[in-house]
Each structure stands twice: as structure tokens, then as C-alpha cells.
């Protein structure tokens, strides 16, 4: 049951993020929408590793056989967050430059290349 | 001596960080020298790995976490001749691009070299890794460095727009890939490619698996510029510094297809529903659409760098047809094609860079007749164009002949004709532009008052200066395209493809250290028909280029008929290429939905 909810919410975040990217009229807002798309990856990864009743995966001073949640996905999410940080910083820097050159954050004004 | 597969990645990463740290204290000459030496060394290392791995994969487990009982506990690099060969080719092109940039990019701060080496490290890791999540991380490393490289001319307007479109589209693609990886992990609890393949052996194609396949295909498909995920491609190519465009077209886009091939052959090939003709015909159809769309767009494009970018899309379509045959000989053909095309396209981009540094423009309309005195560059341009029409004995011809043969065996006889048409049309676009620029053929058009719809940025790379080294680089690259077809590489490439496509062998070798069985498939024969079809491409390309040049001399009735038919199509196609970020993402979302729908309907949910 909880598995289905995780899929559904992750899918919903993906769609909301994509919808925001498509409909938004502000570059910074669009970058945040990219982050929403990324949030779907966090949620899916953490959700997939969840075990009902599982403890945090710190295997020190716990008896053998204690159920814990999957530590692998948590490591993946950490890496994912770092990747996301780099990408977001890069995109925001580009947004700033775009504002300097085009004087606007509106995606329709930032059109030097067409056709 | 056994080489460590980690070396190519480690060397380029260390050099990049070193250059970054020492940046201010190094002169430009030192930065050039060090980065060229490092990328050349990485090329030699990867080539040595390719040779050594011909007798069996070289597997390294980081931190000594050896697999136990068929379970991968750590992250591995698993080097096979194809992976290492692609890595060596990438490093070779980076070396050529860096040599070219010595003259071409005057204002390059040290950061340019740092970014190029990071890009290289990403590509090396992407080719050599044996772990799916690790593959994603290297994919991101190479992607983020290319976003920065695209926007390198940050004081111009075009590069900002191109880089934003490129970065957002590709980031969305990356996250789709990651979602696919997460779904695979959820189903199999594995990230190691070998273990994933074992876990999915004989699995039914359920909803989760199908979703994972679609997400991974679309995620890598954005990078590979498959239709309709390609709209970022021309913008990024137009505005990136030319040495970077060399790498975008020569290897980066192709790595998307390489990634698809790697994941298909190690992970998905054991799923019975994905072995059959249904999945194969779907991939081939996608390749055909991509090839023809790119070729058509190239024909409409006067801006040389954009034209070459669309031509790349067209040739990637042909690579996808090779992969879509799901046969080792088709894969071998695609590999040869990748090498031949990469060399030829790199040479053509260097030619475009030469024009840019001389005249400050790459618009074939504005440059009419300007290249008359540039015999050597013109010759290289012609040879590159012919290589892209698949003229024997260029490497592209051999690759294409194998791809066509494999597609025939896979039951798709139409795809040979699609390849003929795509090569001819995109080749015609290049020949047409070359004839105008270097021979001054065709009518010289007055520069039209800048149409509102077709504004372009031409001011890039103002600091570039011409040097005689530049045509030499272009000449060597085009010789490379010839060498791929002439040197006795066929046996090695076919063996490499068989190893690459041997899923059970891969798993046994990675997880249990089993020695591979020698394979003895005969070389595919290149039949006279393939030769005739390639020559047909060349002839058709010359004919179309001639029509394009001398259309104004045709009788009025014929001209009118041509225009009334072509005008609406070309208007529509160019309108679709709107350069608007929101449109690019819309296309990706639509591509995601339609790939998913098509795959579910065509291959069927098992």
C-alpha cells in the first residue's frame, strides 16, 4: 500500500514540475520547477527503501536482525542532492546572466536563436 | 603490466583540479600544454585498456568490495573493448579540440581547460563503469561541465539562451533517467549492471519495468537528441565555442546512444518481451524518424554550425537503427559508424571554426564565395561532406553497410532506404553550403533585412585568429574518418560488439570472474548492393545540392511548383524549432508520454 502511495506522489511531483516548467513565465520559477522534478527522484528513492517498522540504518549497538530501512537509497539521495545543488547553482547563475543581457526573466523575451 | 581501469578518470580529474588550483599562476601556454598532454595520455591509457580487455574484461571493485555469491557489494568499473574504445575516441577528440582551441579561443581563461578535462573525466567514467548509479553520476559530471562550456561566451546573448535551453532540457532528462534507475532498483534491489541483468532474466515486462525502460530511454534520449527530444541541440551547438561543438557532435550526443546500448545489452536484453521483433521495430522506427527529421532540418539551415548540428541528429538516427536491430553485427556497424561520423563531423566543425575566425560568420548566405582562396580547408570540407554521405571507403560506409545488413536480417528492409535518403539529404545540405562558401556557386543573395523570425548571434569568438595549424587539425581528423574504413579494424570491432552484447558472459565475468568463451561469428559481408546504395546517397546528395544552388534558373512553372510544395513545410518545421524553453520541455513531456504509450501498446504488457 505505502509503495503505491510513493509511486503516486513521485509521479505527481514529476508531472507538477513538468507542468510548471511548461507554463511558467519566469526563469527563476522554472529553475525551481526543475527542483520539483528532482524532488520526485528523492521521494521515489527514499520511499522504495522504506521498510515498515524499520529503524534508521545506523548499525552500531543494535542487536542482529533489527529491521532497518535500506541504506543504499539514502546514499543515492545524498549524491542526488549534491548533483542537484550543482545543477541549480549553474542554472541560477545562467538566469542572472540572462537578466543582465536581456533585461527580463520572461522566457519569451530570451529568444535570440530561432528557426 | 595490467593497467587500472580507474586511471583515465583519475588522471583527468586530478589534472582538472590541479589546473583549477594553480590557475592564476599558470600561463596560457602551460595550461594548453598540460591539458593537451593529459587528454592525449588519457587517450593512450584508454586505448591500452581496449587492447588489454580484448582477452577478457578488466574488472575493478572500488575499495576491494568483491562480489560474493553473485551479489555485487561495491561499485565496479568493467572494461570491455567497446567501452574503452569509445573512451579512447572521446579522449582523442578532446585532444584535437584542445589543440584547435589553442588558436581558436584567445580569451580562454584557465577555467576553459578545467571544464574540458572535467567533461573528459565524465565521458571516460560513463564508458567504463559497470554500475548504473555510477553511470548516472558520470553522466551528470559530463553534463554540468558542458552546460558551463556552452555558456562560455557569457557576455553574449545567444550563448545564455542556448545554455539555458540545453541545461534545463538535459537536466530534466537526467532526472527521468534517475527515476528509471530508482524503479529498477525498487524491482531488483540491484544497481550493478551485471546483477540487474541476472535479476531480470526471463522477467515479464510488467508496468514497473516498462516505466523504467521508458524513463531511461527518454532520459538518455534527450542527450542523444532523438526525435522529439532534440530541440535543445541546434541552440547549444550554435552558441558553444567551436572546439566544444566538435565534442558535442563528435562524441557527446553519441554517448546517449552508447548508454542506451550499454543498459539494453546488460540489463534489459534478458527480458523476453524485449528480445523480439516488436521492440526492435520500434527502435528502428524511432531511428528512421530521427534520421529523416534531422536531415530535413539540415537542408533548411543556412547557418553552418546549426546545419551540422541537425546533420548530427540525422546520423544519430542511423546509429539508433544499428542498435535497434538488437544484433551484434548491427551494433558493430553502429560502432564503426560512430567513429567514422565522429571524425568527419569534427573535421567539418573545425572547418566552420576556421571560417568563423576568418570572417566572423558561418552563415553560408553571407559567406558566398568568400572561401575561394582557401583550397585546403575547402578540400577537407568536401572530404568531410563525402564521408557523411557514406562514400566508400570512409568508415561511415562500412558502418552503414553493416547496419543495413543487420537491419535486413532483423526484417526491416525499408530502413536501408531511409538511411540512403537521410545520408543524401543531410549530405546535400553540407555540400550546398560548401559549394556556396568555397566555390561561390549559386546566386549570391543580398543579405535580406533581418527577418524578425530568424535573428542569430554571429559575434561569438571574436578573439579567434587564423593559424595554419587549424586546417592541419581538420585534415588529420578527416584522415581519421578514412582510416576507420581502411585499417583492419573489422575483426576487432565485431568481436568487441559480440562481447558487448553477451549479457550472460558479462554477468559471469563481472560477478564470478569467469573467463569469456571465444566467439567465432563470421564477418558480415559487404555486398555490392550496399556499395551501390552508398553511391546512390552520394549521387542524390550532389543532385539535391545542385537543385538548391541553381533553383533560380529552373523554368518558372517548375520553380513555382517546388516552392508551393516546400514553402509551407519549411515554414512549419522552422516554426516548430522555436528556441523557446517552454516548447522544448513540452516536446520532452510529449515524447515521454508517447514513447510510453507506444511501447506499452506495441510490445504489450506481459
Image (spheres, rainbow, N blue to C red):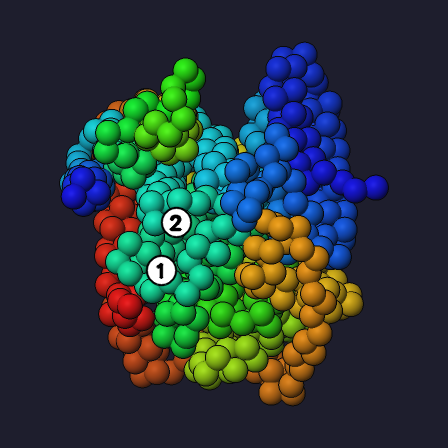
Image location of residue A50, percent across then percent down: 28, 34
Between the C-alphas of marks 1 and 2, the distance is: 30 Å
> Quadrant of residue B208 in the image?
bottom left
Q: Residue furthest bottom?
A: B528
Of the pair B42 and A108, the residue shown nearer to us: B42
Mark 1 and mark 2 on one chain: yes
In the figure, B43 relative to B342: above or below?
Answer: above
Disc 2 chain ID:
B
Q: Residue furthest top?
A: B25
* Quarter of the N terminus of chain B within the rendering: top right
Image location of residue B560, percent across then percent down: 30, 78
Image location of residue B137, percent across then percent down: 47, 36
**Can I make out residue B182 in this image?**
yes
In the figure, A115 relative to B555: above or below?
Answer: above
**Can I make out residue B248 in this image?**
no
* Quarter of the C terminus of chain B within the rendering: bottom left
> Quadrant of residue B594 in the image?
bottom left
Disc 1 chain ID:
B
Q: Nearer the viewer, mark 1 or mark 2?
A: 2
In the figure, B14 relative to B139: above or below?
Answer: above
B154 displayed left or right of B378: left
Answer whether labels 1 and 2 touch (C-beta < 8 Å). no
Q: Which residue is mark 2?
A: B188
Of helix, strand and loop, which one carries label 1? Answer: loop
Q: Which residue is mark 1?
A: B227
Of helix, strand and loop, which one carries label 2? Answer: helix
Amino acid at each position: 500500500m505505502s509503495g503505491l502511495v510513493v509511486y503516486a506522489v513521485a509521479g505527481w511531483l514529476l508531472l507538477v514540475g513538468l507542468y510548471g516548467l511548461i507554463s511558467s513565465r519566469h526563469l527563476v520559477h522554472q529553475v525551481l520547477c526543475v527542483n520539483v522534478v528532482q524532488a520526485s527522484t528523492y521521494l521515489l528513492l527514499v520511499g522504495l527503501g522504506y521498510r515498515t517498522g524499520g529503524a534508521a540504518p545506523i548499525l552500531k549497538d543494535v542487536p542482529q536482525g533489527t529491521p532497518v530501512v535500506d541504506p543504499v537509497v539514502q546514499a543515492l539521495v545524498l549524491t542526488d542532492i549534491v548533483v542537484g545543488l550543482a545543477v541549480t547553482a549553474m542554472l541560477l547563475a545562467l538566469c542572472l546572466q540572462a537578466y543582465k543581457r536581456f533585461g527580463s526573466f520572461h522566457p519569451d523575451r530570451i529568444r535570440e536563436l530561432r528557426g | 603490466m595490467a593497467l587500472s581501469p580507474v586511471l583515465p578518470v583519475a588522471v583527468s580529474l586530478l589534472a582538472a583540479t590541479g589546473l583549477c588550483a594553480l590557475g592564476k599562476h599558470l600561463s596560457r601556454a602551460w595550461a594548453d600544454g598540460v591539458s593537451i598532454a593529459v587528454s592525449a595520455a588519457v587517450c593512450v591509457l584508454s586505448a591500452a585498456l581496449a587492447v588489454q580487455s580484448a582477452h577478457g574484461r578488466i574488472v575493478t571493485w572500488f575499495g576491494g568490495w568483491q562480489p560474493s555469491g553473485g551479489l555485487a557489494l561495491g561499485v565496479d568499473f568493467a572494461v570491455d573493448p567497446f567501452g574503452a574504445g569509445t573512451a579512447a575516441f572521446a579522449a582523442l577528440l578532446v585532444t584535437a579540440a584542445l589543440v584547435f582551441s589553442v588558436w581558436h579561443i584567445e580569451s580562454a581563461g584557465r577555467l576553459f581547460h578545467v571544464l574540458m578535462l572535467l567533461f573528459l573525466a565524465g565521458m571516460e567514467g560513463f564508458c567504463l563503469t559497470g554500475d548504473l548509479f555510477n553511470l548516472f553520476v558520470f553522466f551528470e559530471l559530463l553534463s554540468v561541465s558542458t552546460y558551463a562550456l556552452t555558456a562560455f561566451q557569457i557576455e553574449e546573448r545567444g550563448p545564455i539562451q542556448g545554455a539555458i535551453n540545453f541545461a534545463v532540457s538535459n537536466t530534466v532528462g537526467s532526472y527521468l533517467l534517475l527515476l528509471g534507475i530508482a524503479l529498477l532498483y525498487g524491482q531488483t534491489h540491484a544497481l550493478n549492471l551485471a546483477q540487474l541483468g541476472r535479476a531480470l532474466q526471463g522477467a515479464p515486462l510488467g508496468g514497473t519495468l516498462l516505466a523504467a525502460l521508458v524513463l531511461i530511454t527518454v532520459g538518455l534520449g534527450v542527450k542523444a537528441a532523438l526525435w522529439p527530444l532534440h530541440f535543445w541541440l541546434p541552440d547549444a551547438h550554435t552558441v558553444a565555442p567551436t572546439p566544444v561543438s566538435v565534442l558535442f557532435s563528435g562524441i557527446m550526443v553519441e554517448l546517449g546512444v552508447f548508454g542506451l546500448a550499454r543498459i539494453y545489452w546488460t540489463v534489459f536484453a534478458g527480458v523476453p518481451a524485449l528480445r523480439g521483433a516488436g521492440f526492435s521495430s520500434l527502435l528502428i522506427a524511432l531511428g528512421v524518424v530521427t534520421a529523416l527529421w534531422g536531415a530535413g532540418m539540415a537542408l533548411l539551415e543556412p547557418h553552418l554550425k546549426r546545419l551540422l548540428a541537425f546533420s548530427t541528429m540525422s546520423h544519430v538516427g542511423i546509429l539508433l537503427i544499428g542498435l535497434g536491430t538488437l544484433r551484434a553485427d548491427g551494433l558493430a556497424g553502429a560502432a564503426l559508424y560512430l567513429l567514422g561520423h565522429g571524425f568527419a563531423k569534427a573535421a567539418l566543425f573545425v572547418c566552420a571554426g576556421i571560417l568563423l575566425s576568418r570572417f566572423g560568420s558561418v552563415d553560408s548566405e553571407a559567406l558566398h564565395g568568400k572561401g575561394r582562396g582557401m583550397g585546403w580547408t575547402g578540400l577537407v570540407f568536401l572530404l568531410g561532406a563525402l564521408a557523411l554521405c557514406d562514400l566508400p571507403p570512409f568508415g561511415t560506409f562500412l558502418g552503414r553497410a553493416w547496419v543495413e545488413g543487420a537491419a535486413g536480417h532483423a526484417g526491416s528492409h525499408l530502413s536501408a532506404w531511409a538511411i540512403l535518403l537521410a545520408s543524401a539529404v543531410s549530405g546535400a545540405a553540407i555540400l550546398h553550403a560548401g559549394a556556396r562558401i568555397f566555390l561561390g556557386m549559386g546566386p549570391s543573395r543580398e543579405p535580406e533585412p533581418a527577418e524578425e523570425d530568424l535573428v542569430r548571434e554571429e559575434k561569438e569568438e571574436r578573439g579567434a585568429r587564423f593559424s595554419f595549424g587549424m586546417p592541419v587539425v581538420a585534415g588529420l581528423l578527416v584522415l581519421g574518418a578514412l582510416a576507420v574504413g581502411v585499417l583492419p579494424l573489422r575483426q576487432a570491432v565485431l568481436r568487441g560488439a559480440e562481447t558487448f552484447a553477451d549479457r550472460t558472459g558479462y554477468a559471469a565475468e563481472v560477478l564470478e570472474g569467469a573467463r569469456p568463451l571465444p566467439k567465432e561469428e563470421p564477418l558480415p559481408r559487404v555486398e555490392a548492393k550496399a556499395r551501390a546504395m552508398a553511391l546512390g546517397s552520394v549521387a542524390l546528395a550532389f543532385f539535391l545540392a545542385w537543385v538548391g544552388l541553381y533553383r533560380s534558373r529552373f523554368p518558372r512553372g517548375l520553380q513555382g511548383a517546388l516552392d508551393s510544395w516546400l514553402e509551407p513545410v519549411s515554414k512549419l518545421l522552422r516554426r516548430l524549432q522555436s528556441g523557446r524553453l517552454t516548447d522544448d520541455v513540452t516536446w520532452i513531456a510529449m515524447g515521454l508520454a508517447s514513447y510510453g504509450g507506444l511501447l506499452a501498446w506495441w510490445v504489450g504488457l506481459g
